[in-house]
Image (tube, rainbow, N blue to C red):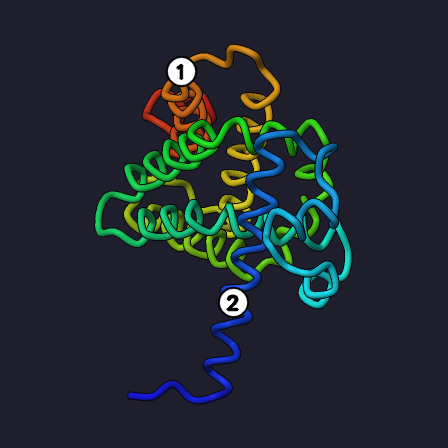
Amino acid sequence: MNVSVPKHKALLVQLARQNIVDAVTRIIAADGVQGFSMDRVAAEAGVAKGTLYRYFTTKSALVRATVDHCLVPMQDELLETLGRTGPPDVLLAEMIQRHLGFFERHRSFFRVLLYDRTLAQSKAARYKNSRFRQLMERTAAVVEAGMQAGLFRPLDPLKVATVILEADIAMIGRRLICEDPGPVEDDAALLRDMLIHGIGQPGPGDRQGQR
């Protein structure tokens, strides 16, 4: 079946943007943000500078698009994990482990951006990102399922999801600035104990102490 002209053009635009973003990723990973310029990106991507500005009007827009692109595989992985069938506390624990693990596997790239404050500047933007909102809503759904199953106390699921994701991001930031952050499994276990066990139902002894 032939691809329509509009779809063909859209595909070409997507491929062109992908090529440019890949060029930015290579430059930042090799030389940091300080080695990044629109001229160098155009040369690395093999496109005219005018073509580059047609897709990305500013340097900050290009960096933001690159970060978003790099986060897509992680978000897909976390959404897939949260969408599985299983005990909610186990799913949340696995999500935390995978979240930290992704940044550990791509440590060099994201560490450069953190030092340049690019990630810090994007905190407000992530709440406007539809994929991040989807991740937050999926996390909230798992939290709510845990509440219905009696695993967690009745709290606002969306607020709990926000706390979990922000705690993950804070731990990721700490690991990126540390020269020797230690095993990712240890930090994932710490978050799991604090966030999952911390929202669990109180035990008999706790109930008695509350009387």
Q: SS for tag 2? A: helix
Q: Between disc 1 and disc 2, whose residue precedes?
A: 2
Residue 183's disc number: 1
**To which quarter of the image does residue 195 belong?**
top left
Q: Is residue 22 above or below residue 178?
A: below
Q: Which residue is mark 2?
A: 14
Q: Is residue 76 above or below residue 165?
A: below
Residue at the image point whose x is 52% and y is 58% from the top? 18
Residue 57 image point, x, y percent = 76, 61
**Mark 1 in CB contact with mark 2 (< 8 angstroms):** no
Q: Is residue 129 left or right of residue 91?
A: right
Q: Nearer the viewer, residue 34 or 111?
A: 34
Residue 46 image point, x, y percent = 60, 54
Residue at the image point whose x is 59% and y is 30% from the top? 30
Most distant residue in the left direction: 85
Tell me if residue 9 can be seen.
yes
Residue 131 image point, x, y percent = 51, 58
How many discs appear?
Answer: 2
Classed neighbour count for the residue bearing mark 2: other residues with Cα under 10 Å, few (<14), some (14–19), many (≥20): few
Q: Nearer the viewer, residue 42 or 88?
A: 42
